[in-house]
Amino acid sequence: MRQFLIHRKTIGIALAALFLTVIGSACGDEGKPKAQPTDVAAPTSAPSATPVSAQKRTLVVYSGRSESLIAPVIKQFSEATGIEVQVKYGATSALAATLLEEGAKSPADIYFAQDPGDLGVVKGMLTALPIDVLNAVPAWARSPEGRWVGISGRARVVVYNTDRLTEADLPDSVAGFTEPRWKDKIGWAPTNASFQAMISAMRIAWGEQKTLAWVKGIQANQPKVLPNNTSIVQAVARGEIEVGFANHYYLHQLMAQQGEDIKARNYFTRDADPGSIVLVAGAGVLATSQSKESAEMFLRFMLSAPAQQYFVSQTHEYPLVVGVAKDRLLPELDKLQKPDIDLARLDDVKGTQALLRQAGAIP
Amino acid sequence: MANLAELGRIQTGVAVKKQRPHIALWVAGGIVGTAAVLPVIYLVIRTAGAGQEAWDLVFRARTAAVLGRTALLIATVTFFSTLVAVPVAWLTLRTDLPFKRTLAVGAALPLVVPSYVMAMTLIEAFGPRGILQQLLEGPIGLHRLHDIYGLGGATLAVVLVTYPYVLLTARGALRRVDPALEEAARSMGYGPVATFRRVTLPALRPAITAGVLLAALYTLSEFGAVALLRYETFTAAVYAQYSSALDRSVAASLALVLAVVAVVILIAEDFSRGHAAYHRSSAGAARPAKNVKLGAWRWPAFMFVLLPIIVGLLIPLTVLGYWLAQGLAHGRGAGPVWEPVRHSVFISLLAALATLVAAAPVAVLAVRHRNILSRTIERLTYIGFGLPGIAVALSLVFFGINIATPLYQTVWLLLFAYVVLFLPAAVGALRSSLVQVSPRIEEAAQALGRTPVKIMTSVTLPLVAPGILSGAAMVFLMTMKELPATLVLSPIGSETLATSVWSSASEALFARAALPAILLVTVAGVPTAFFVLRDPARRSMPEAGPIRPERTGAG
């Protein structure tokens, strides 16, 4: 009998404690301001966007770019303008799907995406941007209808293992990887959005037949199927595969953590073919946003020199604004396949997936 | 199954007087059941808009092949999960295994390692040119390990994150198995192995199947680990749709196929369940079990229990520590962690509590008022667990923003999502403990004039406490690592440990991902220790003998 009493007391106390903790936390959450601009250091460089006090309102950003990469530059924006920014982080595609489900009731003001494909998917929910925002970047890096604007550039590259290969061993064009010499040596991520954007570029540059033949040719070489860019770069560095198709900056992230002696390097195809097309991460403003001016200010800030400089130094991407210097390790943008294909033309993701499915590359 | 029939004979003879359940119980059960099928309703709504293209995708030869591969993975995962979990549960509860309480906590913890982290660290450790190979290259000149990719590696990773389901439910039930049965078997000349196989194991069957069912459904919905280990399952096709084209009707129709598979698994499990009774048939209470002396088997058994802990916990932690150290050495600090820790613990505690509350009417109906309706409700709660997390999350976006607008992107809708997702863990744990409680005890209390509420709090709850605790522990650990629903539904700006790990890992910032991942395991370890480490002797009833009135009547 005493056992029972102890038992019930323990459970009772545990439950009471749980409730108190929970209620305490909940109250704490509500009582607390969402952001504390006072306890952060002053920005190192003054951004060019001017603070506007009349527009002070909370901005809600749905960001497919990860917190570790862009939280600092968003903080700079808040400090410079006094506009509070709440960010929902997630996978670019999951956020696009969320936006579609939310429809007109979405609380989001801005959608910040990893790739133009997903911006294209929610294009109908985005509002036309002011001309000065659009003109900050070259024409290939923005939506022709003015619905979204590129913020930073990322090149498609061939990552290769430096123990097994030198640049001289690599073909001038990605077309060369269909040769039997590359059997069992390639890694790719056919479900990845950037990879599919590259295939879309191939369809525009090469036409359907040649692209399909290329995908089938790579398939014949029995590539290792990986889920994303990160695992491709890792697999190359481990020597598990000799080459892989990825975005350029993942290598730089790994080098920053593991040192420059890792066994992988980027190769930009000499032929400036779709294998080294430059894609963008970009953003648009929701048509249902109640604070469009603040949202536009956010985009202007992201396209200002200090923010562009941030992307160059911290995320190892290409700046899209004239006058901001690129990373010394990257080749000039002009030398890559970029101005020939408007990125907005890459939005036929469906057609690209149908082609990949036809070749058996994706389920 | 002969063993079961035998057990049934030992224990049958209880004429369960069917009581009319309180109407509130059915209403509560109905609400919970409805909540559980919301994701499926959403998928049906979305699929209704699907065109020919979607159906072409569903009905093609490849679908059958991929479903076959999925079924194969489910088979290997459930087999090996049981093979690991049941002996570990028994050894850490009923024997004189050295360090058994520490081992018991360690063995439950791989549950909290996010599956993709498990896969990444296993690849780093056992993959080509991984840590193991580098260690072996020097001394024995081994240059090629067996390939970790494919069915073998995928099974390994998924077993490591799912065997704790079976372990926790089996432990909860093992504490309540009456040792008198085992002693009777021993006295009739059965050896310890035969006793375990013919008496203990059949008595644990409801708990084991509850755990195995979770493992099977988890495998069905699993994506991250199997993709990294390059084994294509059907969920990959669903994610391929969600990851780019965003034709929601196509994605939904494929996800609906998974729901159908989940239903098939549930029906199969239901058929295997049978009608045996699992509680004591005679008066009296279970005593604490005597520890079996392992003798010469002590240390081999110790190694057996240690193995999954090494592979599923120590190796991932070591690799994470290595990444962290490597990053720190290159001047890459870790991100802020205090806020995510607070959020994770807060929301996971709430989720454990809410899920148990929701599970209670379902489990009580399923055990005490067995009919088609109560069984259907119970089965329905499992479906969400077999669906891809993103599909469940989007379904709640859909219902949340259209029906429960004020709750949208508040902690309440997120909590609701966790309840929908993790109900089966709580229902399974509660149900398998409840079947071990004889309704006679409750009837005795009723005869003594106790109200139903009083019976619930003074009789039933204390008796099923081990099940409640293992269910709570499971929901807590699962919520700690949940990702897709957390990302989509959490209030804007709130970050959990699981989302910080993912956010960094997805950008190849492994050093930054390591610290929250380590914290995820250690912060989750504290409550698990609390739940699992408690002395089983103190937990079971101390004395034998007939039920005395004051026992059930103790207020």
Image: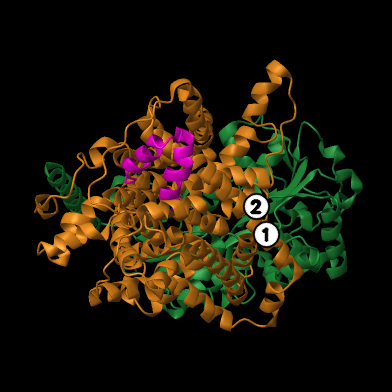
Chain colours: A green, B orange
- Chain letter of disc 1? A
Where the C terminus of chain B falls, by quadrant?
A: bottom left
State which quadrant residue B370 falls in: bottom left
Q: Between residue B229 and residue B80, name the one nearer to us.
A: B80
Q: Between residue B342 and residue B418, name the one nearer to us.
A: B418
The residue range painted magenta reads: B176-205
Q: Residue A285: in sight, yes or no?
A: no
Instruction: Tell me the residue at 54%/33% (across/down).
Output: B319
What type is the residue that disc 1 sits on? Thr
What type is the residue that disc 2 sits on? Pro
Badges 2 and 1: C-beta atoms under 8 Å apart? yes
Q: Where residue A259 sits in the image (x, y, percent)?
A: 61, 31
Residue B224 lies in the magenta stretch: no
- Chain letter of disc 2? A
Q: Residue B202: in sight, yes or no?
A: yes
B150 lies left or right of A61: right
Asked if both marks, 2 and 1, belong to the same chain, the answer given is yes
Query: Overall secondary structure of the magenta stretch?
Result: helix
Q: Where residue B259 sits in the image (x, y, percent)?
A: 54, 69
Q: Secondary structure at mark 2?
A: loop
Of marks 2 and 1, which one's residue comes earlier in the chain? 1
Q: Where residue B167 sits in the image (x, y, percent)?
A: 44, 44
Q: Between residue B18 and residue A274, name the one nearer to us.
A: B18
B413 lies left or right of B392: left
Q: Where residue A274 sits in the image (x, y, percent)?
A: 78, 58
Which residue is under mark 1?
A: A191
Q: Between residue A67 and residue A135, name the one nearer to us.
A: A67
Residue B181 lies in the magenta stretch: yes
Instruction: Tell me the residue at 23%/59% (across/down).
Output: B440
Which residue is under mark 2?
A: A227
Residue at the extreme front of the image, as rendered: B188
